[in-house]
Amino acid sequence: MTYYETDNGRRGEVVAEDIEVGIRCDDDGGDHNGDYVRLRQSPCDCQHEVSSEGGDSSSQPCSPARSLWLWVRLVVLFVFLVSLAVVFFKWVGPFFMNKEIIPIINWEAETFSTPVLAVFVFASVALFPSLLLPSSPSMWLAGMTFGYGFGFLLIISAVTIGVSLPYFIGSLFYRKIQGWLEKYPKRASVLRLAGEGNWTHQFRAVALIRISPFPYIIYNYCAVATNVRYGPYILGSLVGMVPEIFVTIYTGILIRTLADASQNQQFLSAPQIVFTVIGFCVTAATTVFFTVYAKRKLKELQIDDDQLLQ
């Protein structure tokens, strides 16, 4: 805080971001301020102050160095990502496609019919989470085989069972799961948000946890120990997993497109490349947006709950 004397004899004040030590001189009985020593300077000092012996403060715009450096870093990051994508699509992708993906797709087409694949995808997405096994490859397979429409309906119906079975199985180990949560209070505090408040609060918390990067399989078993009711749990899980389902389906479609182009020894046409790159960028940006949004909202819920407890 810096004080100065105005024309009418009253003492005014200027709020400064820096910590300053002032030496006041009272030789003539006035409230004049002497020189001061600046202890810490803010990162972007936008205001130059004159010593308060009747002087005025003047302001100047911030230096654009920081914003310029931010743009430089963004450009470098963009160039790096584009270069990485080019290397992947030109060398790494085709090699991986020819050695791994194409043989699997050919084996799948020769061994299973479409109805059998639908049953396999449904069963794996529904049962693998209970066995602590990842179900994302099965979702990729749904995207490669059935596309967005039937693939989404197949996955979302299987997810209903996939998140329900661990919920009911976890109720048999309620005490043990609670003991595990008590060992990690900081991480468990996010999960416990879903068990507090009314139905709407629980639904919102579960949906945000599903969108956030918290492990899908772990939360399936830990949810019951937070005392969240089954209604908001199942609906919040289905709503919160919609972005992830579309991302996995898109990934499967992209893998199938690249595999077909590599198997036929053909390059993607210019429109295909454009739509593929745009789709990938939109998918990545959407994933980042929803993840950041969910983490911020969960933090806000934590702050609100802490304030209520105080």
Image (cartoon, grey):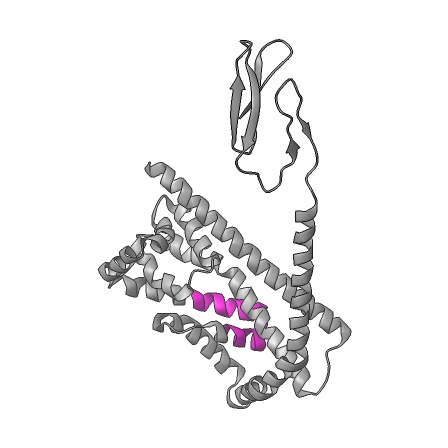
Tell me if residue 154 can be seen: yes
Q: Give the percent coordinates (x, y) of residue 81.
A: 65, 67
Q: Give the percent coordinates (x, y) of residue 153.
A: 52, 67
Is residue 155 magenta-colored?
A: yes
Residue 252 picture quarter: bottom right
Left or right: where 66 falls relative to 233: right
Left or right: where 131 falls relative to 258: left
What count of labels does the image hold? 0
Residue at 64% x, 83% y: name it. 94
Which quadrant does the C terminus fall into? top left
Q: Give the percent coordinates (x, y) of residue 90.
A: 68, 80
Q: Which residue lies furthest to the left in this view?
A: 175
Vertically, is 83 above or below 180?
Answer: below
Q: Give the percent coordinates (x, y) of residue 155.
A: 49, 69
Tell me if residue 14 can be seen: no
In the image, 13 versus 182, the foreground residue is: 13
Vertically, is 151 above or below 231?
Answer: below
